[in-house]
Image (cartoon, rainbow, N blue to C red):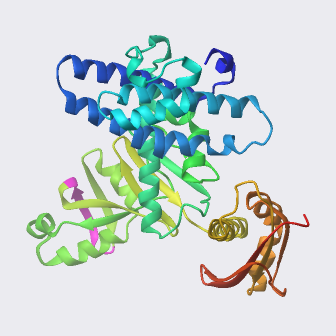
């Protein structure tokens, strides 16, 4: 690990911290004979920290073709995590851990078996509990943003213009400041906006909901008129005024005095905004569509299908292909024109022909419905690339 220490980035330091915290947790559980807790901690680390988070975060780095220090650091950290994990797993899953260790480290470490290794010890210098807490906050925000996307039926492949975070704590603000790049990548957002602690987002409108149980005894037969008048008022202004106790208002029903128990308030979402809460705040996702966002969304949809076709052809990861994409909607074809280089590079296509009026050929040809747009795609091995 020393050879790449200067190239470690924040996500590398986080997974190493989590790994060493895991060692301490498993150590303590085994010492107190709470073996089920040890197994649960290992399972959570493998599924949540390693597979569903760290591997996703480092994927772009592993595709760098040159021996880039950033790529080598990601490989080295992943290697160290897996070798250490094989040793932690050994008492609980002896056969799987043995297979992992023999494939990864037996020859390099000169041990015939993982069960001949010393028990792992944590490195306190690699543990950063503050960073672990911040990353946990980012994961909570990411999950909330995903929930908001689902409400608007917006896939993660499609970018969103912005995500607005309304935090309840200063720790949340600091976590987003430190890990904004991670958050932006994992939520596929063009920008992240963080409000002040407890600050209301000024783009939200506030709906006034009259409470007839309180209005009736005071206004009697005029309660309906008062309620109608209240609903026409500015919700934000009334809420601010009532924070001081009561409000005397001039309405179409005459001058009235309103107290806090006579109304309640509900945030009203602007068009194309979806919201969800997380433990320390709320997330607002702007799902409005621009030409740029639509173009990128379709580009990623096309890429996914080309990758599916590569898989169906059982191609090696680095094998180049000639690709053909017929987009039957000329407008969408025009949007995709600026993304041809991206699609071709990611699909390992030495040539990519994309238009609304082309002949599609290849060893494998498929018709696709891409978000309501008919497309035909063809792939053939790039023997002439």
Q: In the visual, does 116 lie left or right of 272?
A: left
In this view, the residue in front, 136 or 32, is 32
Q: How many marks?
A: 0
For the view shown, which residue lies furthest in the left direction?
217
Q: Position of residue 244 (x, y in %)?
A: 29, 44
- Indicate whether 235 appears above or below 52: below
Camera-side residue: 22 or 252? 22
As drawn, 23 above or below 192: above
Residue 85: which quarter of the image? top left
- The span picked out in magenta is 252-260
Residue at the (78%, 42%) spot, across then down: 65
Pick the quarter of the image with the C terminus.
bottom right
| x 21%, y 28%: residue | 35
* Front one among 231 and 350: 350
In the image, taking residue 347 as reference, residue 145 lies left or right, namely left
Quadrant where the N terminus sits is top right
Instruction: Please say whether residue 18 is visible from this viewpoint.
Output: no
Q: Position of residue 110 (x, y in %)?
A: 54, 17
> Residue 221 location, x and y as percent?
13, 78
């Amino acid at each position: 690990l020393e050879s790449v220490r200067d190239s470690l980035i924040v996500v590398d330091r986080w997974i190493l911290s989590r790994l060493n915290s895991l060692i301490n947790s498993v150590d303590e559980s085994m010492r107190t004979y709470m073996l089920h807790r040890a197994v649960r901690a290992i399972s959570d680390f493998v599924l949540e920290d390693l597979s569903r988070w760290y591997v996703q975060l480092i994927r772009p780095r592993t595709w760098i073709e040159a021996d880039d220090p950033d790529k080598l650091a990601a490989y080295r950290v992943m290697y160290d995590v897996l070798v250490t994990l094989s040793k932690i797993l050994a008492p609980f899953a002896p056969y799987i851990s043995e297979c992992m260790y023999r494939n990864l480290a037996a020859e390099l470490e000169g041990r015939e078996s993982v069960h001949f290794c010393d028990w792992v010890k944590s490195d306190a210098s690699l543990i950063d509990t503050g960073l672990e807490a911040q990353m946990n906050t980012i994961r909570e925000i990411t999950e909330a943003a995903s929930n908001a996307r689902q409400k608007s039926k917006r896939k993660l492949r499609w970018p969103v213009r912005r995500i607005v975070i309304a935090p309840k704590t200063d720790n949340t603000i600091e976590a987003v400041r430190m890990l904004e790049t991670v958050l932006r990548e994992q939520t596929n957002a063009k920008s992240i906006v963080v409000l002040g602690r407890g600050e209301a987002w000024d783009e939200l409108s506030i709906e006034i909901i009259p409470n007839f149980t309180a209005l009736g005894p005071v206004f009697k037969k005029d309660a309906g008129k008062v309620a109608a008048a209240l609903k026409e008022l500015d919700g934000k202004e009334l809420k601010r005024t009532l924070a001081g106790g009561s409000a005397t208002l001039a309405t179409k029903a005459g001058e009235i005095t309103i107290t806090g128990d006579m109304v309640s308030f509900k945030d009203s979402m602007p068009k194309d905004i979806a919201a969800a809460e997380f433990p320390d705040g709320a997330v607002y996702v702007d799902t409005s569509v621009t030409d740029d966002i639509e173009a990128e969304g379709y580009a990623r949809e096309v890429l996914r299908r080309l990758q599916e076709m590569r898989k169906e052809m059982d191609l090696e990861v680095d094998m180049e292909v000639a690709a053909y994409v017929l987009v039957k909607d000329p407008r969408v074809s025009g949007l995709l024109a600026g993304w041809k280089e991206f699609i071709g590079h990611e699909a390992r296509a030495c040539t990519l022909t994309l238009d609304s009026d082309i002949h599609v050929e290849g060893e494998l040809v498929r018709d696709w419905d891409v978000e309501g747009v008919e497309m035909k795609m063809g792939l053939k091995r790039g023997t002439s690339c």
